[in-house]
Image (cartoon, grey):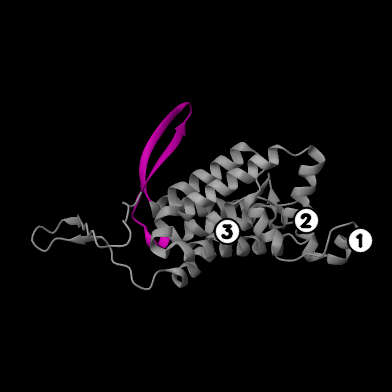
Amino acid sequence: MVTYALILANTIVFMYQLTLSQPELHRLMLLGGVVPVRWGHPDWAQAVGFPPAGLLPFFSSMFLHGGFWHLLSNMWILFIFGDNVEDRMGHFRFSVFYLAMGLLAGVAHTLTELTSVVPTIGASGAIAGVLGAYLVLYPRSRVLTVIPIFFYPLFLELPAFVFLGVWFLTQLLAGTMSAGGGAVGGVAWWAHIGGFIAGIVLHRFFLRRQWVDPVTVDAHSGQRVLIIDPERESRWPEER
């Protein structure tokens, strides 16, 4: 429920962005996005017209996107991985977890680029936290992955720990090579890295206290079977 609500909220905000004029959109990005210099050099930021910095931009920036493909890619990843993590945490805990991961991702980016005047926007930092949690909770789930070989798409089912491990290494390599650790090529690499590590470390504090794995091993056949219990409050989807 929360995963779908987040996708809907991001879509609505993006549709609102489309109604704005260019100056209005530019102002929204500056005030609603994470502009690191507002925290790194607050006196200068206020002198040029920024209001006093607080925590609000770390949250508002999660719902702003720079274009249709930016929105689509983020929401597609959230759709694939978010629901399984939400199942393990419950709706309220997952909501708090998602916002906390976005906050920590924004802080990680700010600390690595304190002089940047470029606003950072997008849900990818929070989603990176969801990916970190998924890596620990479902390491052997199969992820259908497309690998382009020239013009030929090769489809492979990779274990989650392989898929997410390669993803993290690419973020780490790009972040390490980027000047100052900031947003290079339009990507805030260290926001992704910070969110992912935060998700791995902190997800355990958001898990439900009692959770029964619906998949068990039959004592006679040794095969994995799915338990169907009509008295359960929620249905557990297959890992994907």
Q: CA distance from mark 3 to mark 1?
A: 32 Å
Determine the main secondary structure of the stretch shown in magenta. strand
Q: Quadrant of residue 175?
A: bottom right
Residue occupying the point 76% across, 43% down: 25
Q: Which mark is residue 47?
A: 1
156 falls in the magenta region: yes
* Residue 187 position within the rendered picture, expressed as x and y whole percent measured from the top left: 65, 48
Magenta segment, which residues? 135-159
Residue occupying the point 77% across, 54% down: 31
Query: In the picture provided, is 197 more to the left or to the right than 108?
Result: left
At label 2, the amino acid type is: Ser
Mark 3 lies on a secondary structure that is: helix
Q: Is residue 45 visible?
A: yes
The reply to whether discs 1 and 2 touch (Cβ–Cβ < 8 Å) is: no
Of marks 1 and 2, which one's residue comes earlier in the chain?
1
* Residue 189 position within the rendered picture, expressed as x and y whole percent measured from the top left: 62, 53
Residue occupying the point 54% across, 46% down: 8
Name the residue that disc number 2 marks: 116
Name the residue that disc number 3 marks: 193
At label 3, the amino acid type is: Ile
Front residue of this view, candidates 160 and 56: 56
Query: In the picture provided, is 45 more to the left or to the right than 35?
Result: right
Tell me the mark number nearer the camera, choosing from 3 and 1. 1
Q: Residues within 10 Å of mark 1 (few under 14, many from 20)?
A: few
Front residue of this view, candidates 18 and 142: 18
* Residue 85 position within the rendered picture, expressed as x and y whole percent measured from the top left: 42, 58
